[in-house]
Amino acid sequence: QLVQSGGGLVQTGGSLRLSCTASGFTFDEAYGIAWFRQAPGKEREGVSGICTSDGATYYTSTVKGRFTISSDNAKNTVYLQMNRLKPDDTAVYYCAGVRGVFNDYGLEYIVHKGDMDYWGKGTQVTVSS
């Protein structure tokens, strides 16, 4: 499973960091870990993804340049650093994982398809205007 932490309430322009820690498996094997979000009344959308074996990353256009995804394999943890937050970023954020090696095209696929094996329980991010 994936255990999430972080999130909360922040003003427009502020920053938050989300964490996603693997439990029951380790990043000694390659995984694609991605972040998704779902705002009230909207469909879930992919945000970003990373391959734990080689550090390849992918960002959707809505967050590129503002969010940074990273992996600390020694801690089996993936982070999502969110800067310059906007009210439109308000959502429940989920991390998810799937085993395998992914280049940037592969990450783009899993971020947009959302066909993942493991899911976190979600954490609320609220950006006030």
Image: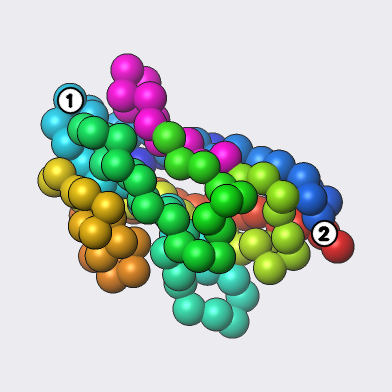
> Local crowd at mark 1 within 10 Å, few (<14), some, or many (≥20)?
few
Q: Does 102 appear above or below 18? A: below
On-image quarter of the C terminus = bottom right
Q: Could you say where residue 127 lies in the image, as x and y percent from the top left?
A: 75, 57
Q: Is label 1 in a helix, a strand or a loop?
A: loop
Occupied quadrant, residue 101? top left
Occupied quadrant, residue 27? top left
Residue 7 in sight from this viewpoint? no
Please tell me which residue lies in front, 75 or 67: 67
Please state the total of marks drawn on the protein image.
2
Q: Is residue 14 left or right of residue 57?
A: right
Taking the view exactly as shown, the residue that stands out farthest to the top is 74
> Local crowd at mark 2 within 10 Å, few (<14), some, or many (≥20)?
some
Residue 34 in sight from this viewpoint? yes
Does the magenta-highlighted stretch encompass residue 76? yes
Circle 1 is placed at which residue position?
28
